[in-house]
Amino acid sequence: MTNPAPLNDNELESVMEINDRTRGLNYDENLLWEKEHNDTAGVDLVPIAGTKSRTGVAQRGNIGLPQVSEPEVVRHFVRLSTKNYSIDSGFFPLGSCTMKHNPRLNEKVARLPGLSMIHPLQPESTVQGAIKIMYELQNWLAELTNLPGICLTPAAGAHGELAGVMTIRRAHDAKGHTQKTIMLVPDSAHGTNPATAKMCGYDIRVIPTKETGRVTVEAFKEALYATDPKGDDIAGMMVTNPNTCGLFETDIADVVDLLHEAGGYFYCDGANFNALVGKIRPGDFGVDVMHINLHKTFSTPHGGGGPGSGPICVAETLRPYIPTPIVVKEGDKYRFERDGERETSCGRLKGYQGQFGMHVRALSYMLSHGADGLKQVSEDAVLNANYISAMLKDDYHAPFEGPCMHEALFTEKYQAEKGVTTLDVAKALIEYGMHPMTVYFPLVVNGAMLVEPTETEGKDELDRFINVMKKIAYDVRSGDTEKFHDYPQAAPVKRLDELKAAREPKLRWQSV
Amino acid sequence: MRYLPQTKAARKEMMDAIGIDHVDELFVQVPKKAFVDGKCDLPDHKGELEIERIMTSYANENNHAQQNRFFLGAGVYYHHIPASVDYIIQRSEFLTAYTPYQPEIAQGTLQYLFEFQTFIAQITGQEVANASLYDGATSMAEAALMAMRITKRSKVCLGNNIHPQYNEVLETYLRNNEGAESYEANESTDAVQDDTACVIIQSPDFFGKPHVYDAWRKICDEKGALLVVVINEIVSLGMLPPPADADIVCGEAQSIGVPMGFGGPHLGFFACRQKYIRQMPGRVCGETVDADGNRGFVLTLSTREQHIRREKATSNICTNQGLCALAFTVHMSLLGEDGFKQLATLNHEAACKLADAVESIKGVKLVNDTFFNEFAIELPEGNNANDVVQALADKNIIAGYPANENTILLTATEIVTDNGINALVEGFKEVLK
């Protein structure tokens, strides 16, 4: 037996390097392209026969793709997963995003071969069950919104907005109302609202809401009649209700009457439908079109940024104009509209029939809750937000009065006096093992912090968040502020240089 | 209700803290008429068992791919998905994360998006790619809008046979842009004019024929138009030359890692030249460093986007297809260089076999003699494509897509077997007049 040789300098350096970034359960994980290129792939396919090519074009050469075995692939992605925060691992109070529990049942049913392994262009006689699911979902959405015209095809919230505003535009065009060129949008709106209206060819007129956080009748009238005494150049308005400040628009009934009088349509951004579901129906407060984010209110998983699904629900008057295809029932058979069947439609907005997998999950969620459970959803969501609001009102500045709906808005005002910003508070929450709230949105207040707890958190979890927020506020008040600028320390990476990323864009791996 | 953790006691305590007696006091600002009287007219909540029964009964009314001989494509392809793909995408940390707005606790998502962008750029032969769009049809529409922004022109030239639904979506997107319109070139480069913003070429085209781009590149350069290539079977790029000369390459990547799922969710992709990145739609992930100088990833170039630019944004896109991009990335990692090419070749070989087999049927003609994994056949006179497809469906053969009166598009992927091909041929012989 010989004594083992000590590590040479290279070996030692490699261990130090590993230990520098990989400790305990924290892994440093390089890119796939930086791994050793394996002789064989991570799949075993049958051998090729060597048939003479009939493509009529040259054969592709080397692509430069990485090549690793299956265990290496699995380990790579599992390690990456440990660097993510998720709703399954903790409280996720991201305002306007409705990060609620995603039941696994919905994943299970969406994977039934009869629902996942069917083709959108199969003969309709072979997919009656799938079309029936879409029809059922249309019915649930119609009842929950009291808006009878449903189109399920939009792929996400912003796509639903596009569908909705195109519907409005199509309705005006059909009536020859070409003078209606302006869309009213409050300054508190999601950025997708003005971006969408622009894509539909509208000019944007902003309604200021800074003073009360709401669209007041006075401010609305000023915007409505600014260039025409009857508001005849107004195509409609896009308002989120409850709005992005977490408030219900108290003047909405009067505002909508004036808008309708001027011949405009009310587009309601449904991002905040979780505050209303099962209890309040948008069709009953004057909404003409609304998109519903199935990946918010109806709990289809966000998946790190999609897939979402943004069906639109419209009033009877707009029904002829919604995008194609919609599901129709004839006797006991279900089918999609045929091409050209509804000439008034604003057209096709997506390939095939929409994000069907999300439709399945959403219907499963709705059936799980039922009419009774959904009502409890909105009540608990609103109660949770108001509890947070009540408990933190002395520590954080609440810019607007009155009970909030399902999210509570604070600003950095008190903390900023000590040099601590909203971003610092957010990064401190990470340090305490929690996902931050939505920051710097809405834009109508300085340093916004928008907290949406959702109904799937119990009081204990809310109290934990409240206590952490109070501790942060206490530290700031006590002048213990220096540390905030260096947070987070405990995350897989420290604060990232976003300016560098934008100035020197590096959007892919490249061999050196 | 199993998903709601609040107890009656906790609700009471919270209401006391707020200073209310009933939760309805929090809804005082809502007009009375908007409240549902009691409950909505819908059934009450149900347990898991009941829901599984209901959803299974819906599923059982469908005739799915595994129960059939399957030859349908037309933009959505039936491929095998390795088991690890679905396992990885169901990891809670990926499935239940939000868009990575807080990068320090979303490096998992951001790194796979960076890897996804790299895969797409390499496969398409382009310099950069974004982090996904909704689907192939919307990505083509976004490409046309981007070309219009760059060239400040408003005519979109459809160069060859493009997926009809893609054209419909484009038409919808263009409708509200003053002066914008699309027109067909029927494969003639003469159609490219001085006011053409871009030429769109699909390859393989809707009938499955692969195309080369040299002549289109030349005319685009002469006329100052952009060349957009749309791909709806991305597996083809394991065999066909990449559209590296295009200005924008967009399309559908469902074939790698994403089930057909009755039309969605699928996976739009978008790649282009580096010089155009500030005009690109959708989310983009970029590399940077953290406070210690270590590598990290963030969403970047957000000054193009709606949450910053509002009505001046390049697109209104927000949530897109993150998890489908992960499925693609995992599947591509498993395939690797050799596996991706082998998969492509297996698809082509299956299609060659299928072509030989159907050509042997009396009266059936191949429309395109060059193809990748899909081609069109013409039926003998007196046969209606829809009726034939329906008749074969009744025999558990999903035969293809009736492209017009007497033409059917047939697809063969790695899943097709010799027995399946024989069954299709026999089926055709039985139903064809």
Image (cartoon, coloured by chain):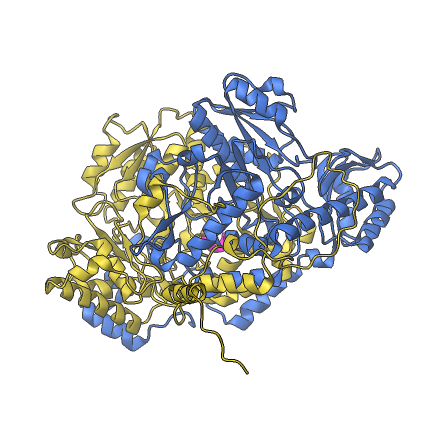
Side (left or right) of A232 relative to B73: left
User: Is any atom of residue A280 visible in this view?
Assistant: no
Q: Which chain is yellow?
A: A
- The answer to which of B226 and B19 lies nearer the viewer is B226
Is the residue B388 above or below the residue B178 in the image? below
- Which portion, as a residue range, is magenta? A136-141
- The C terminus of chain B: image quadrant: top right
Residue A191: which quarter of the image?
Answer: top left
User: Is any atom of residue B324 visible in this view?
Assistant: yes
Is the residue B187 above or below the residue A327 in the image? above
Residue B32: which quarter of the image?
Answer: bottom left
Q: Residue at x 20, y 38 (%)?
A: A219
Magenta portion: prevailing SS class: helix
Residue A217: which quarter of the image?
Answer: top left
State the image coordinates of residue A311 (x, y, percent, origin top left).
47, 48
Q: Which chain is blue?
A: B
State the image coordinates of residue B160 (x, y, percent, origin top left).
64, 28
State the image coordinates of residue A322 (x, y, percent, origin top left).
48, 39
State the image coordinates of residue B24 (x, y, percent, origin top left).
27, 63
- The number of discs equals 0
- The N terminus of chain B: image quadrant: bottom left
- The answer to which of A43 and B203 lies nearer the viewer is A43
Q: Residue at x 27, y 63 (%)?
A: A429
Side (left or right) of B397 relative to B339: right
Q: Residue furthest front?
A: A2
